[in-house]
Amino acid sequence: MRCVILHRLVPDFGAKFEMTSNSTLRHACFAALLVAFLVATHQTWGIVAGGALTQAQDSQILLVLPVSVLLIYMERKRVFADVHWSPAATVALLLASGAFFYARRALAPLSQNNSASLTLLFFVVWSVSAFVLCYGAQAFQAARFPLLFLILLVPLPDRLLAWATTVLQLRSTDATCWLYRAARIPYTREGVILVLPKLTIEVAKECSSIRSSLILFISSFVLAHLYLKRFWQKALLPVLAIPVSVAKNAVRIFVLSTLGMYVNPAFLTGRLHHNGGIVFFALGFGVLLLIIWGFHLLERKSGASTVAKAASSVRLG
């Protein structure tokens, strides 16, 4: 009897050991490929890390990578349920590395921001290819969102960043003027300069809130992935995040300017101006949650109406 038990336990232990060692080898291979890319581009990564802490347009780097890793960890059982090596992905790795070094030479010299954009773009391609190589196409399908979410790591190139900042600046000025009209506060507008009864303000590029707008836009993708089921809802929420961000900026400008006019001019240079962005970001984030809640209400109503129609058709039949 003891021999039979040992005979059954040893193969089970061997299978588990083989599975664990195989999993460790996959993880080690994936980590080694990522480290190899980081070492090859270490100078750019130093600049990227510094820019993430000091430059508004690069702050999304501090959010996207941890969120992507966290989402894969949360869904790890489903992601790694069916894994296998995919040697064909080696071709993608070789092509990605070749295209990256060719682009670095062909496009040189690049500005610091454009160099970071190019490096992080190829980092995303490299990471996805390495994941497919080590874990296979089935695992990629299961981890499709967190892996493709990494594209939001890429900083906007200089021209696109300037265009996005200008659009936010102008649309925030438009929305602020609408709030002044709604509150019946007289004003005169000259571009992005607003002349009010007691003061004159300029909706500068800093007032576009490019940092919080990017983070709100990125957050909308995560919220849609976690809380929405239908594709059109998941696609619509990030689109709606753009006007929500503009409205958030307008409310901030309106509140600060009216407080400065009618309460205390110190509000224009005080803590609410310099450190109060989180308050208005929370307002925009709350609006996104309300939109998600509205989507759920629509689903419940449509589901209830479908059930009612089915029940009526059964009774008629």
Image: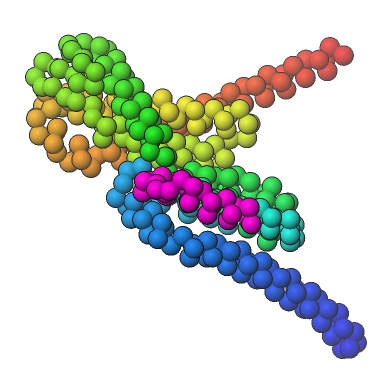
Residue at screen point 64% across, 57% down: 94
Residue 50 seen anywhere in this rendered image of the structure: yes
Q: Is residue 36 left or right of residue 306?
A: left
Specify the quadrant of the image occupied by residue 232: top right
Q: Position of residue 198 (x, y in %)?
A: 9, 19
Residue 80 seen anywhere in this rendered image of the structure: no
Closer to us: 173 or 261: 173
Specify the quadrant of the image occupied by residue 180: top left
- The N terminus, quarter of image: bottom right
Q: Report if residue 102 lies within the magenta region.
A: yes
Q: Report if residue 100 lies within the magenta region.
A: yes
Residue at screen point 63% across, 67% down: 29
Protein image colouring: rainbow
Closer to us: 106 or 35: 106
Farthest residue in the front direction?
Answer: 106
Farthest residue in the bottom direction?
Answer: 2
Residue at screen point 39% across, 34% down: 159
Q: Is residue 67 above or below residue 289?
A: below
Closer to us: 139 or 106: 106
Residue at screen point 58% across, 64% down: 33
Q: Which residues are magenta?
A: 93-118
Q: Position of residue 11 (x, y in %)?
A: 83, 78
- The C terminus, quarter of image: top right
Q: Is residue 223 left or right of residue 299?
A: left
Q: Position of residue 177 (x, y in %)?
A: 26, 16
Q: Position of residue 55 (x, y in %)?
A: 31, 46
Q: Is residue 281 left or right of residue 226?
A: left
Q: Which is the main secondary structure of the residues drawn in magenta?
A: helix
Q: Is residue 36 above or below residue 50?
A: below
